[in-house]
Image: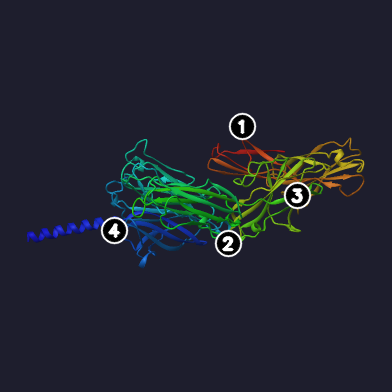
Amino acid sequence: MRVVFKKILISAGLILLCAAAHATHNRAGEITYVQIGPLKIRVTVTTYTKTSSTGADRDSVNVFWGDGQSQYVYRVNGPGAKGEPLQNDIKRNFYVAEHTYPGVGSYEVSMTDPNRVGNILNLNFPNSVGIQFHLATTLTLLNSTIQGYNNSAILLQPPIDFGCIGKKFIHNINAYDPDGDSLAYELVVPFQAKGSEVPNYRFPDQILPGADNKISLDKTTGNFEWLAPQKEGEYNIAILIKEYRNGILLNSIIRDMQITIENCNNDPPILTVPQDICIVAGSRIEFEVSAIDSDTAQKISISALGGPLNVFVNKAVFNVKPGFQSQPATGKFVWQTSCEHISDVPYAIVFRAVDNFKDSTGLADLKSVRIKVVGPPPTNLNSITSGNNKVKLTWEYSNACAVTVNDYFKGFSVWRRVNSNQFNLDTCINGLAGRGYIKIASNVNTKLNNQYTYEDEMVEGGKTHCYRILAEFALTSPGGNSYNRVVSLPSEETCIQLKRDLPFITKVSVNATDQVNGSISVAWILPLADDLDTLMHPGPYKIIVARAEGLPSTSTVYTPIPGAIFSSGSFANFKDTSLVDLKLNTTEKTYSYQLQFFTGSTSTAYGISASCSSVFLQGIGADRIVKLSWKESVPWNNYNYEIYRSSINKPITLIGTTAARSFIDNSVENNQTYCYSIQSIGT
């Protein structure tokens, strides 16, 4: 009996040992998704596992959706949906499922598996096999009617890579966002559960640390470099990919990846690629990529992955001989760009050259080429006077960009400044930021006689006004709203000077803020005598000041202010002047003014000045901050604003300046009353 007992015990020990060996499992992975409905997504959980660990193979994984729901999601790839075996004892698995959320908002999709592979040098070594493998992706479902759909980034480069002791290692996730959102990258500690980092983790350069063992991650390109590994074995790193839209963080993906370092006497190939490229949409890109190796007997394989190869229209191609080729290895990248490719975010194409040091792979060199596709500029911009204080603009635009897939082209914006600003066109810099121009119109699409046209009806006489046009492109939400707007290269400049033959408002300033007894000061200057031609238009002269509620528009009706009539029998005795408009509700309303100018004894106005409004300030209080915003409409360019504040027993004080029409005051205390005023500065 004792002999039998011992045999059973030994067999049980062998069974347990086999189970532990087969439990070693997860190498790398991530979770990505596409939005397929206003509240519905399709998720793909991608894992890379140890092929030989058959006892730990998962035909399904438990996915937690972040809304209190979870489900087992089945594998969909490989023969019999058993996964896709790769070389080097690696299996790739895709688990795909759809889920509908209860409402808009942010959610975290996650998956946790019991085991990682064993003997990861920088993760709870030597017992990494017992550490859970956790993947998580945060997502934001927007109001799709207004803000559009939001898809995760697509990670094009597999998260398994190889290197040699003492040799530079480089890897790039090669993430591409189909919505044109911007991406940023950050090294983080891998996770074993939601909010719980793995124990006893060290970044790879902390294994035999030293001056010749350093890692770095480029936050913009995603390039991970390790110069240079010092110890043979398997390492894991985690990279957080953050996705931003208009500066707001929407999504994040944690990619957990494996790097295998071997003791090998080999140098990586050397890739040669062009510098980053900026190109006008509609142009063709064509360049050669080549690679050599210090070991001339080795062969090299070149591959390419990136956004240009994945766009939905006019995909790029990389023509290269399949497999390994003799040195120098070459390939040709070709991309016929179109206006659907216009984006503020450069496309990245990552080229990878691998030698055949081992049977199936060797060391690699990676180099990225970033390609920015910009919209062509509007052409043949001209300006003419079209009436008092009016300028008519006409221009042309490429038909290839005016008619785009999914109505990507949205129209034009019109920009104006006082006096010229000549600069050389740079295909890497679209738009007019920092050039001193003010946008005066958007979504302009009016066409007459095969030319686009716009009339500026608020132009100050006596100054040189210069204009440029931008074409605008944007994605469209299901509700027809635009998002991720992109502007083209600017047109050439056109400048025009109008006669100052009408009076011009120089000031509209709120003196008192009150619902009943508010007041506004209005000041103006007279026309120039030479521009008016007082011989052709003799006196008497008269100015009637008229007022309207709200900001000025083409439909605004102005009513003369009782008693606000200023006249003179001769121009020599006609003086610049002002008035104070009383009994106004300046707390809740903004007011606009115009001057009706009469010459001679006629009852018909010679002309009407450009309209001008007061600055209407609003404030919202929160926890120790006040958010200010204001609006106005003036015929000149306000380029800066001074913000003043006062409180009980404290004088009014300048607290900040800004070029924007908003300001956040974060130097306030709760339960206090503050008063603010805005002073605009312009030309």
10 Å neighbourhood of mark 1: few (<14), some, or many (≥20)?
Answer: few
Q: Which residue is mark 2?
A: 478
Residue 53 - label: 4
Residue 234 - label: none
Mark 2 vs 4, N-terminal side: 4
Mark 3 vs 1, N-terminal side: 3
Residue 649 - label: 1
Q: At which x and y percent is residue 120?
A: 31, 48
Q: At which x and y percent is residue 566?
A: 85, 40
The label nearer to you, 1 versus 2, is: 2
Mark 4 vs 1, N-terminal side: 4
Q: Is residue 177 visible?
A: no
Q: Which residue is mark 3?
A: 382
Q: Is residue 549 above or below residue 12?
A: above
Image quadrant holding the C terminus, namely: top right
Mark 3 vs 4, N-terminal side: 4
Residue at 64 percent across and 48 percent down: it is: 489
In the image shown, does 611 or 89 lie closer to the viewer?
89
